[in-house]
Every structure is written in structure tokens, then in C-alpha cells.
Amino acid sequence: MAEITMEQIKALRERSGAGIMDCKSALNETGGDSEKAMDILRKKRTDIADKKAGRAAKNGIIYSYMHVRDLGGVPTIGVMVEVNCETDFAAKTPVIKKFANDLCLHIAMANPRWMAPAEVPADVVEKEKAIYREQLKESGKPDNIIDKILDGRIKKFCEENCLLEQIYALAADKSEQKTISAMLKETAGQLGENMAIRRFVRFDVKGE
């Protein structure tokens, strides 16, 4: 078995935010493969999050972000989010603050309209279906095929417009290309508490 160096452990810790012993254990398990070690740490966090999921998250933070489009300009996009956790102590940690900051940056860029698919108004869904159905009919698709395609189109619409279904917009590499709901679960596992995104709002200067 390859010897795990302190440099490898430190690098994995900086990347994952996990504890030294967890990083060492994951690297030992994978023979020093940092990518596989990251997968182990993510799996461990999601398992922890699943166990905590039923617990009340009544504490948390309000976090905000102001975006300036032009150098030397004024803020023209503003975002506020409420992220909940179980304890006041956890709400003060860098872990939850980093998640809230990343969330604000994502919302500023991706402009989600709703939190989850269940919140999309029925009339909006029907309007989207009508548009897609007309497009598909013009292409000559039979009705039974159209219905199946519509389900996929609406799912895609929700993935693009619902915060929890969106892929993190500022992913630096493939390892960060995950949904906001997956990021939330990983962060909850890292924090060791149940977490929730309670609400968000995004302001964009439109002018008259």
C-alpha cells in the first residue's frame, strides 16, 4: 500500500473541508487516489445528512450578496437567502457561511424562479406544455409520443428554473457540477446537522 503523505492529507482537507482523520482514512482506503477519496467523503456526508433529515432546523442565517456588473459601477443585482440549521452554534460556522455565499452567487447568475418543482404554478406548467405540444405537432410527432416527450420537457424546464434542481452555476470543474440540492445535502453532512434553504429573493435593476 502506498504511503499517504501529510501533503496529500492537507490537499484533500483544503479541497473537501473534512477533518484530518477522515481525509487520512479516505486516502488510505483508496490507496492515495484523491478523486476516489473525495467520493468517499461525499458519500459519508450524504449518509449523515440522510440520518439528520427529520430533525427540526429552526436556527440559521440570512446572507446577502450585491453584484456590480461594471468595474467602478454600482450594484445592480442583489440576492438574499435564508439558510436554516439546527443550532445557533452551527449557524456561526464557516461551513454554513460558505454554502450561503456560494448559494447567493449561484442565484445571482442562474436567476431561479422557484425553490422546487412543487412550487411551479399549475398555469405555468400548462402554458409550457401547450407551447411544447404545438412545436411537437408541427414536427409531425404522434400524440402518444408527444405525451412522453412533454414529461421530459417539463422536467427539463424545472431543472432550469427551480433552485434545488439547478446545477451549480459557478462549478470550477466536473467535481463541482452538482445540483444545489446535492450541495445542500453534502454541506449538511459536513456540518453534522439537518439543513434547509428556507427562502430566497433576487433583485435586478430594470429601470422604467
Image: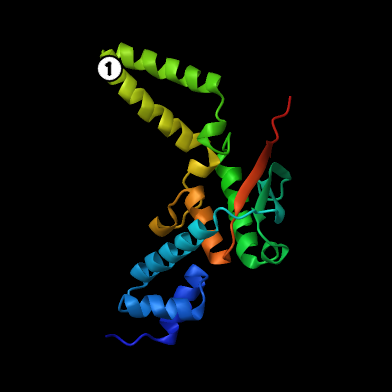
Relative to 145, is 114 on the left or the right?
right
Judging by the rendered image, the residue that carries numbered circle 1 is 144
Question: Which quadrant, please, contains the N terminus?
Answer: bottom left
Relative to 109, say whether 175 is above or below: below
- Relative to the observer, which residue lies in front, 69 or 94? 94
Relative to 201, is 146 on the left or the right?
left
Image point (31%, 24%), residue name: 148
- Relative to the observer, which residue lies in front, 191 or 141? 191
Question: Which quadrant, please, contains the C terminus?
Answer: top right
Q: Amino acid at mark 1?
A: Asn
Question: Residue 151: where, in percent of width, then height?
Answer: 37, 27
Relative to 108, is 72 on the left or the right?
right
Image point (73%, 28%), residue name: 207
State which quadrant residue 146 falls in.
top left
Relative to 20, say whether 77 is above or below: above
Mark 1 lies on a secondary structure that is: helix
| Residue 121 seen in the figure | yes
| Residue 169 seen in the figure | no
- Relative to the observer, which residue lies in front, 76 or 120? 120
State which quadrant residue 2 falls in.
bottom left
- Relative to the observer, which residue lies in front, 143 or 87? 87
Relative to 42, say whether 76 is above or below: above
